[in-house]
């Protein structure tokens, strides 16, 4: 080891780096091999030695056959900057073991291109002239990373140190010393979102394959994401052919996706879209979808949520390929964090949460960022062994604090929590963050397509940076638009407040867009999936889908599957004066509109007696041409029964309120009235019809986008739940069981609720018969 240390010092490595390298056997052997291949065992310039060290730690394993050629270019100073070397890595990663095209290689690496300080000055001057007004307006809040990236785009082979120095100098010349105002924290203003409400009518979903946009697994060697840095070349995210071949061998070339909910709440209709994308793609391609519980926070996980999620996934019609937990991989994640430190890509930090936030806002490095690798390794081990207090240390990824992407500002990889884990027990007191864990577990599970909503798009850079830093297989990442629906909220925080502060009756309140709430309301999983398929898998963010479109799909299905029945919500007594009080006639009523005459199972029996009940709204004292209800002297048809004619009206003492109607029926059905009413009769003389409770649910909020209102709770619809305690129903409804669905004729679609008892049935209105969607689209 002493010989190796002397060799490393000869090529210009500083003593600390050389000693840290000795601690890593793999890097040590790689670096010795590189020094020998480069024939510089007697020493070389420090700048050359640093490039050789980078080759030893980052050279693509699938292109080792070309390493000697690259070393020739380095030793001869044809490749002399980190930017050129990174470009060489990117080129060789794609080339692999195939023949090297020297001319294309030299072009890709900028061989022979000389960028003088004067060239850089001209580029910087031109940029400042172009952006002068914006810089003067933003002053020291100007994003230097943007300026740096602009210069790098014009001069990719420029020395980054010179670029940074010239930019800093120009900013100072233009703005002068920082003022008190420059040092104040900016006040963040809440953005006012312009809401676009989708008006398009549903397409013929069966003719559309929404999954055609996704590439096949064997195509995942192509570059589809570029990650820009402030101090190094662009990272072109892709798998080497060797890495991809190993992945395809492990998976058999199958599509593997994942649905990764956090087990800390109930799923909502937005998750239905995620399931449709994740499970649907895997099913369409003959692959599998993991149901992976993202359980990195031990304080938030509950078995109640895990059980709920598994049940809802099954109810939605999806079958997981495997059920896994992020905590299943805690050991692998920890080991890879250690490796990340060894590679100089992570460090233990002692800043508080507020300090981290402040430093990130100011784009300042942590004072602990450049601590020795050996020190971070020891401290991280102490963190794991419970030797450091909670909140006193975190492990942070060493990314790019000058990036124009906030999600590259040295994200936290691990934090200390002295909390036992519901799934992993009390083995761990350090837990990985989502930003660290989810991409690695995607790779470990050989996920082919990592699909998520657009708010995660800015995290794509961090996703690929981490997998690249650890030399892991990289899934194909793609983001789609969130599902936003009018007249509701779907943020977990807002939903939790509605439930915990009793604005609604639990997570399965039928007014909520939780899947449990929709299920209780009587919405079917097939209707939800048809709705999601209809809106498509798009990237058009910021739009809202009308609630009426979901209702359209619900009606489409229930119209075909829900049996018919008659219920009167607000009964008005009608006495049939020309029918004997003791007479009860059993009539056939259709369960389905197109019920065949010879199929007895398509009909149900309803009694017709001399006391029937109609809706109060179906009677008026004054008739009109456009009114089809009952009025004095007017005839209407009782559905499945007989025409009746109003002969007398009994009023209360106030001479205004209608108490009772007397009517005569036409037993021979000679009259053919236009108006048809639903009704319920006494099943036997003096016996009231079946009494049921009916809950009429409507939109939870009055505004289309309540989530954007400052006082969003003030927008709650006071009529979103109306309870009718004593409605009258036809006798067969007494046999209804929980979740049985019906069309109450002329009223809407309803479902038997779980609160029902043998003594009292309760029905929830799923949706009205009226097609609001069609009207809203006109």
Image: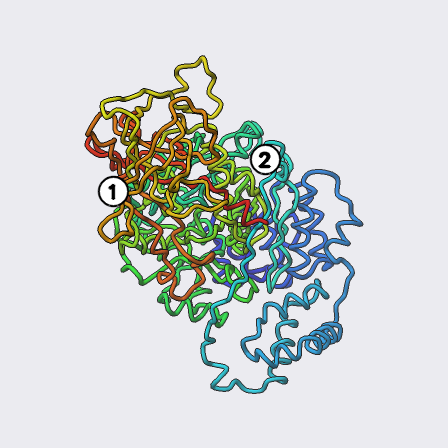
Q: Position of residue 289 (x, y in %)?
A: 48, 33
Secondary structure under the numbered disc 2 in the rendered image: helix
Give above or below for 673 relative to 384: above
User: What is the C-alpha distance between the residues marked 2 and 1?
Assistant: 40 Å
The residue carrying mark 2 is 205
Q: How many marks?
A: 2
Compare residues 540 and 75 and report the one nearer the observer: 540
Crowd around label 2: few <14 · some 14–19 · many ≥20 (10 Å): some
Residue 327, quarter of picture: top left
Secondary structure under the numbered disc 1 in the rendered image: strand
Q: Which one is in front in this view, the residue at disc 2 or the one at disc 1?
A: 1
Would residue 730 appear left or right of 244 to someone viewing this image? left
Compare residues 324 and 118 and report the one nearer the observer: 324
Q: Residue at x 38, y 32 (%)?
A: 644
Q: Residue at x 24, y 48 (%)?
A: 652
Farthest residue, direction top: 598
Mark 2 touching mark 1, by CB under 8 A? no
Q: Position of residue 116 (x, y in %)?
A: 75, 71
Task: Answer yes or no: is residue 623 visible.
Answer: yes
């Amino acid at each position: 080891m002493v010989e190796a240390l002397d060799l490393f010092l000869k090529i210009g490595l500083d003593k600390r780096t050389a000693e840290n390298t000795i601690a890593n056997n793999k890097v040590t052997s790689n670096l010795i091999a590189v020094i020998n291949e480069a024939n510089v065992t007697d020493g070389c310039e420090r700048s050359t030695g640093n490039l050789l060290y980078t080759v030893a730690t980052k050279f693509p394993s699938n292109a080792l056959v070309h390493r000697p050629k690259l070393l020739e270019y380095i030793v001869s100073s044809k490749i002399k900057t980190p930017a050129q070397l990174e470009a060489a890595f990117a080129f060789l990663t794609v080339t692999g073991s195939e023949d090297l095209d020297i001319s294309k290689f030299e072009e890709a690496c900028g061989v022979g291109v000389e960028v003088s300080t004067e060239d850089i000055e001209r580029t910087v001057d031109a940029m400042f002239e172009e952006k002068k007004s914006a810089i003067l307006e933003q002053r020291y809040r100007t994003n230097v990373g943007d300026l740096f990236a602009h210069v790098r785009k014009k001069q990719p082979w420029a020395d980054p140190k010179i670029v940074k120095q010239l930019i800093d100098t120009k900013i100072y010349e233009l703005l002068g010393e920082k003022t008190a105002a420059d040092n104040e924290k900016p006040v963040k203003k809440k953005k006012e979102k312009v809401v676009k409400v989708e008006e398009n009518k549903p397409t013929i979903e069966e003719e559309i394959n929404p999954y055609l946009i996704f590439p096949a697994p064997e195509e995942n060697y192509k570059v589809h994401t570029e990650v820009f840095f402030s101090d190094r070349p662009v990272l072109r995210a892709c798998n080497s052919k060797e890495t991809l071949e190993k992945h395809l061998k492990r998976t058999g070339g199958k599509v593997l996706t994942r649905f990764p909910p956090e087990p800390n709440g109930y799923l909502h209709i937005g998750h239905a879209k995620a399931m449709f994308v994740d499970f649907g793609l895997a099913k369409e391609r003959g692959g599998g979808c993991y149901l992976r519980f993202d359980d990195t926070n031990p304080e938030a996980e509950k078995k109640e949520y895990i059980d709920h999620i598994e049940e809802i996934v099954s109810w939605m019609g999806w079958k997981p390929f495997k059920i896994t937990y992020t905590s299943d991989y805690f050991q692998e994640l920890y080991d890879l964090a250690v490796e990340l430190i060894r590679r100089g890509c992570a460090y233990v930090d002692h800043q508080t949460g507020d300090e981290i936030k402040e430093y990130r806002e100011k784009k300042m490095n942590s004072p602990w960022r450049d601590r020795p690798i050996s020190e971070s390794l020891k401290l991280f081990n102490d963190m794991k062994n419970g030797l450091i207090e909670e909140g006193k240390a975190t492990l942070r990824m060493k990314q790019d604090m000058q990036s124009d992407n906030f999600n590259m500002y040295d994200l936290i990889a691990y934090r200390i929590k002295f909390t036992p884990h519901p799934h992993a027990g009390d083995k761990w007191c350090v837990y990985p963050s989502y930003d660290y864990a989810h991409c690695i577990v995607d790779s470990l599970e050989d996920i082919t397509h990592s699909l998520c909503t657009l708010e995660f798009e800015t995290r794509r850079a961090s996703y690929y940076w981490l997998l690249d830093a650890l030399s892991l297989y990289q899934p194909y990442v793609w983001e789609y638009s969130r599902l936003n629906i009018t007249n509701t909220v779907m943020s977990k925080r807002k939903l939790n407040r509605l439930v915990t502060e009793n604005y609604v009756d639990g997570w399965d309140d039928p007014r909520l867009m939780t899947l449990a709430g929709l299920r209780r309301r009587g919405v079917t999983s097939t209707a939800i999936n048809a709705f999601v398929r209809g809106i498509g898998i798009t990237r058009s963010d910021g739009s809202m889908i009308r609630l009426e479109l979901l209702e359209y799909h619900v009606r489409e299905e229930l119209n075909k599957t829900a049996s018919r029945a008659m219920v009167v919500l607000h009964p008005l007594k009608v006495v049939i004066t020309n029918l004997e009080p003791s007479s009860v006639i059993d009539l056939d009523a259709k369960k389905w509109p197109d019920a065949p005459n010879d199929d007895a199972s398509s009909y149900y029996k309803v009694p017709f007696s001399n006391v029937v009940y109609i809706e109060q709204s179906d009677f008026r004292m004054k008739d009109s041409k456009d009114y089809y209800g009952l009025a004095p002297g007017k005839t209407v048809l009782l559905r499945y029964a007989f025409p009746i004619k109003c002969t007398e009206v009994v009023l209360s003492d106030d001479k205004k309120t209608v108490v009772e109607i007397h009517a005569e029926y036409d037993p021979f059905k000679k009259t053919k009235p236009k108006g048809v009413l639903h009704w319920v009769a006494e099943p036997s003389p003096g016996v009231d019809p079946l009494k049921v409770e009916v809950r009429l649910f409507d939109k939870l909020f009055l505004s289309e986008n309540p989530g954007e209102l400052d006082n969003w709770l003030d927008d709650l619809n006071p009529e979103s739940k109306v309870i009718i305690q004593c409605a009258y129903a036809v006798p067969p409804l007494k046999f209804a069981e929980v979740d049985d669905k019906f069309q109450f004729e002329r009223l809407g679609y309803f479902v038997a609720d779980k609160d029902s008892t043998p003594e009292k049935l309760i029905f929830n209105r799923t949706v009205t018969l009226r097609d609001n969607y069609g009207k809203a689209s006109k």
